Amino acid sequence: MNQLSCFKAYDIRGKLGEELNEQIAYSIGRAYARIIKPDSVAVGGDIRLSSESLKLALTLGLLTEGVEVLDLGMTGTEEVYFAAQYLAIDGAIEVTASHNPIDYNGMKLVRAQSRPISGDTGLFAIRDEAQRLLTDLLEPSALQELSRQSQKMAGNATWQYGKANYKKHSILEPYIEHLLSYINSANIKPLNLVVNSGNGAAGHVIDALEQAFIQHKIPVHFIKINHQPDGNFPNGIPNPLLVENRQVTADAVLHYQADFGIAWDGDFDRCFLFDEQGRFIEGYYIVGILAAAFLQKEPGAKIIHDPRLYWNTEAVCQQYSGRPICSKTGHAFIKERMRAEDAVYGGEMSAHHYFRDFAYCDSGMIPWLLVAELLSLSDKKLSQLVQQMIADYPSSGELNFHIAHPQNVIAKLAEHYAHQAVQTDNIDGLSMDFGNWRFNLRVSNTENVVRLNVEARADSTLMAQKTADIMSFLTDAE
């Protein structure tokens, strides 16, 4: 079996023991150094039980190649993004499997200025070099030496290996200050917020924000559930996209009569919002809310969106004189387009939100801070902010299908609807516009599934009917 099947289109993810282990992590560190050629790199890791040992092996690989390493400790992905920009270093790596099963782990890699490293921009070159280097690690003596050196490094705040230096370093304080720069604390009215870290990496940031709120007299009170980081995930893998994982947050919002609720995935690069009635708000409409928030501050700014669902985003941009720009789905594509356009904000319906002032990277903390400010300024509830958007542009939510020959099925669907469509594009998968409704069907870049999204103009019955029609077609065509 290919030991480096853990390399995906955008990041590294694999089953522990089979696709990813300390030897592979060490080889990835060395390969990253050889391909990217950095002088200094920051590393961090999420709360998974395997993250620390993988991070140490990765670090040792970097040090072996003469790279200075700053170990940020337990972090979410956006903290390493922030570190690359704030510290003006040559790259950063987060050890995380985000919302994957408990027996998985992985890595997300960036270079200087937090520019993403994906398959098109060096990730596969790192894979090939790591595969070559891995053959040198198969001898038992080499594995024993790797383990011995990792243990020595683990107990030191600073350490030297060859000519390279290792140092544990916290960027939490400046990171918190940066988060607060997105809001005017004087605007915030008293709010009670349910925060569900899912026993993942978000808890320490919430605690730090809580202290900053006290210091700045920001009247926000946190109701914390599943707060303590625990790599055993006693309450399940933190993935609020799964319907079965949402109820605990919804129930807490209702029980505590909170103004809204927030839940994060494991590495908290995505946040998911619940209104004051405990209802889950689809990420599509949060894109509209955040676009409005930025455009009210910067009229005429450019907003990047993905092609799955966007009518509501276009309407918001029109209302506030913004310029909507469609980009292919995926963080590497969104970030590249944002840089090219100097866009202030980019949003995907999958709850990835990107910010120009955050090195064009995605954050799971900035969105809810902006929503808190918007609620305070508008004196409205979250349900009121989104109800008109949902009524004007009802959507199916993302529906996933396991299809053996997806491209054949997509081609059949395009042919079936060709005579009805007023517009068809292939920016990302198949998008067809029929005037009063539209759909997008695309093959996932990260999973073996086909994803369907349908929306309509102010007609939820039509949206539901067309969604059912396409679902039936997909089933029959397969």
Image: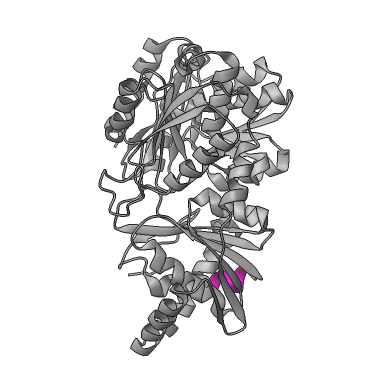
Quadrant of residue 344 in the image?
top right
Q: Is residue 30 visible?
A: no
The N terminus - image quarter: bottom left
Name the residue: 43% across, 43% down.
444
Q: Position of residue 399 (x, y in %)?
A: 36, 31
Name the residue: 35% across, 65% down.
19
Relative to 390, is 342 above or below?
Answer: below
Quadrant of residue 289 in the image?
top right
Q: Position of residue 421 (x, y in %)?
A: 51, 20
In this view, the residue in front, 416 or 382, is 382
In this view, the residue in front, 468 or 131, is 131
Q: Position of residue 338 (x, y in %)?
A: 66, 40
In this view, the residue in front, 240 or 179, is 179
Q: Main secondary structure of the magenta part?
A: helix
In this view, the residue in front, 297 or 220, is 220
Give left or right: position of 299 versus 96: right
Q: Which residues are magenta?
A: 31-35
Q: Is residue 181 visible?
A: yes
Residue 81 lies in the magenta stretch: no
Name the residue: 52% across, 34% down.
348
The C terminus - image quarter: top left
Q: Position of residue 217 (x, y in %)?
A: 58, 30
Name the residue: 60% across, 34% down.
216
Relative to 462, is 129 above or below?
Answer: below
Relative to 59, is 284 above or below?
Answer: above
